[in-house]
Image: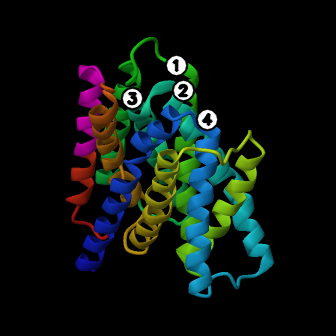
Amino acid sequence: MRQNMFNGYVWILLAALLWSLLGVVSKFCQHAGVLPLETAFWRAAIGCAFFLAHAALTGGLRIPLRHALTFMLFGAWGVGVFFGAMQMAIKLSGGATAVVLLYTAPVWVAVFSRFLFDEHITRRKALAVLIALSGTALVCFSGGSLPGETSLEGIGFGLLSGLCYATHYPFYRWWQRRYSTASIYGFMLLGGVVALGFSGPVHVDHAPDTWGWLFALGLLTCYMAYICYGQGLKRISLVRAAVTCHLEPVLGTLWVWLFWNESFSASGWLGGALVLSAVFLLTTDKTSE
C-alpha cells in the first residue's frame, strides 16, 4: 500500500514537472506570433494525435460511439475552454500568474470528490488545501508577474482555467475503471480541437522553430503529462493528486523567471513558498486516504 502510494506521488510529480513547462513554452509560441487561441488549438491537436495513435496501437479506439461522443462533449469544455482560458491568462497576466491561478482547482476537487466519490477530507488535507489557496491568493494580489497594472481579465481567465482543470479529476476518475488514459484523452482532446477550431483562425505557415515549440507544447505538456497524471490517479486520491500538483506553479514561476524575466513581489514569492509547503504537508500525511 505504502509503495503504491509512493509511486502515485512520483507519477503526479512528473506530471507537475511537465505541466510546469506550459507557461514558458507558450510564451515562446506567442512571442513568435502565434495567437493565444491558436496556441491552445495546436497544443490540443498535437496531443490528440499522440493519444489517438497510442489508443490505436493498444486497441483503445474500439469503444461505444455514445461514450466517445461523451468524451468529446466534455472535451469541448475540459479542453477547449480550459486550454483557451489558460493561454489567454498567460498572454494577459503572465505565465507565472497563470499557472498559479490554475491551482485554485483543489478547492473544487475537494468538493467534487467528497460528493461524487465519498472521499474523506481529513483535517490535514483541509489544512494543505487552505495553505495552498492562501499562497495562490498572495500571488494574485501581489500584482501578478508582468510589469504594469494587474489585468482583471487575465485573472478571470486564470480562475476559469482552474475551474475547468478541477472537472478533469472526477470525470477521469469516473471513467478510468473502464477505459485507458489514451482512450479517454484521445477523444476528449478531439472534442477540444473541434471547439478551438471554431474559436479563431489557424495557420500552418509557421517557421520551423515555432513548430518546434508547438510540438513540445503538445508532446510534453499534453500527451506525456496526462499519461503520468493518469498513472498517478490510479494510486492516490483526487485531493492528494490535486494538491501535490501545486509543485507545478512553483516550477512554472521559476522557468518564466529564468527565460522571460517574469518576477513577483515579495508577497508573490511568499505565496509560492506556501504552495510548496502545502505539498510537503500533504506528502508527509500518514493516513491511508
Residue occupied by mark 3: 137
**Image point (67%, 58%), residue name:** 75
| Residue type at tag 3 | Ala
| Residue type at tag 1 | Ser
Tag 2 near tag 1, CB within 8 Å:
yes
**Image point (43%, 40%), residue name:** 23
Quadrant assignment for the C terminus: bottom left
Work out whether mark 2 precedes mark 3 in sequence or the reverse, and give the earlier one: 3
Q: Quadrant of residue 261?
A: top left
Residue furthest to the bottom in view is: 59
Left or right of 3? Residue 109 is right
Q: Is residue 276 magenta?
A: yes
Q: Which mark is residue 154?
A: 2
In the image, the segment drawn in magenta is 264-277
Q: Nearer the viewer, residue 72 or 122?
A: 72
- Marks 2, 4: nearer the viewer: 4
Disc 3 on helix, strand or loop?
Answer: helix
Q: CA distance from mark 3 to mark 1?
A: 15 Å
**Image point (74%, 41%), residue name:** 199
Residue 69 percent location from the top left of the image = 77, 68
Work out whether mark 4 precedes mark 3 in sequence or the reverse, and give the earlier one: 4
Q: CA distance from mark 2 to mark 3?
A: 14 Å
Work out whether mark 1 precedes mark 4 in sequence or the reverse, and give the earlier one: 4
Q: Is residue 83 magenta?
A: no
Q: Residues within 10 Å of mark 3 (few under 14, many from 20)?
A: some
Residue 175 seen by the camera: no
Q: CA distance from mark 2 to mark 1?
A: 5 Å
Residue 47 percent location from the top left of the image = 56, 61
Residue 80 percent location from the top left of the image = 66, 49
Residue occupied by mark 4: 35
Q: Nearer the viewer, residue 280 or 125?
A: 280
